[in-house]
Amino acid sequence: MSDTGDETVGANPPLAPWLQTQLRTLLAQRGHAWLLSGPSGLGQFDLALALARARLCEQATADGACGVCGSCHAVAVHTHADLCMLMPETLSLGLGWPLDEKRQEKIDKKEVKPSKQITVDAAREAVSFTQFTRSRGTTKVVLVYPAERMNTITANTLLKTLEEPPGAVQFILATEAAHQLLPTIRSRCQGHTMHWPSHEEALAWLSEQAPGEGKAAARPAPADLLTLLAAAGGRPADALDRLRAGPSSASAQQWQALPKAMARGDVSVLSDMAPAQAVDALQKLCHDVLAVKAGAQPRFFNASDLPGGKAGGPGFMALGAWAKGLAAAARSVEHPYNPGLMLETLASRARQALAAK
């Protein structure tokens, strides 16, 4: 569901069915600021961009943008003068959206690193953008994603314009962590909670999007898709990222092997993961072991793949301490001193927690 910047020029990229339904609902309503919120992997960015594209389209329908007009073409090639993409520089570069020329030059010369946050300078430029005369059509759009990447100063820079935008300006904010936004930002937007697809919808879409489409021999096995969708917590876009990272069978087998490998302290199963991915995987493992211990069903793993069980395995105190340690690791995982050593430490602590009584 991700917009990677490589869509066919002028085309209107098809949305997943559950996103198309939400787009129709949003287009039938009016408002100058929307906040699309929900956990990762549900398509916030795709829905936000489709909504922006439809608002700017010269021949929009109740289903969205036409995909063939000059406005749709300009959005597709990332040059629409009435669309401001307010994103972290790292994400803009990854998705192919242009940066300010001077900033891009500094990044190219290695004078500065691309920011992982939405900068206050970028927010000021967005405010200036809203004050310019429209170049075409009847509206201008500011798309902010992920909105939680605004710090307090950046958010406050947008606040007055967000409350009373000049002329026909629309804001579309999308976030995977609405609780991190300032209450004043949330209160100035109409909220839309992202819908979860049904299990059947997610599996069907994942099968269609999986690498190797059209080559029957290369298509992922249904069992592998089930495993990877469970590993992503039912979030189809996150599951697709796992599929694109490597062969589906290898990814599924690695996920199934993770619990018992951690019980042995075998760090090799984490070797292909970045520290942030490893912490996320271990948090899911800790969650499922706790769930089974409490008599509930696991969410991310098959019960048969988990060490211990309701009667055996680690005790609640050990699992609680492990969960607390993983939460602390998650707060600093973006800047590990030594990624390899961090993975070894994570594996060692997992073995200790899973062996404790």
Image: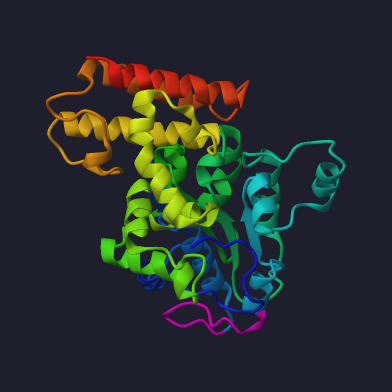
Q: How far across and down, in percent of the image, does residue 48 sit? A: 50, 61
Residue at x 61% of width, y 61% of height: 4
Residue at x 17% of width, y 29% of height: 293
Q: How many marks?
A: 0
Residue 113 against residue 82 in the figure, above or below: above
Q: How far across and down, in percent of the image, does residue 313 sit? A: 21, 23
Q: Nearer the viewer, residue 262 or 115?
A: 262
Q: Can you see residue 77?
A: yes
Query: In the rendered structure, does residue 63 fall within the stretch colored magenta?
Result: yes
**Corner quadrant of residue 8:** bottom right
**Corner quadrant of residue 62:** bottom left
Main secondary structure of the magenta stretch = loop
Residue 238 against residue 28 in the figure, above or below: above
Query: In the rendered structure, does residue 231 fall within the stretch colored magenta?
Result: no
Which quadrant is the C terminus positioned in?
Answer: top left
Display colour scheme = rainbow
89 relative position to 168: left or right: right
Residue 191 against residue 264 in the figure, above or below: below
Q: Can you see residue 15?
A: no
**Corner quadrant of residue 194:** bottom left
Residue 278 against residue 320 in the figure, above or below: below
Residue at x 23% of width, y 15% of height: 317
Residue at x 62% of width, y 42% of height: 118
Q: Which residues are magenta?
A: 59-70
Q: How far across and down, in percent of the image, does residue 295 sit? A: 12, 34
Q: Nearer the viewer, residue 157 or 113?
A: 113
Q: How far across and down, in percent of the image, does residue 54 sit? A: 52, 74
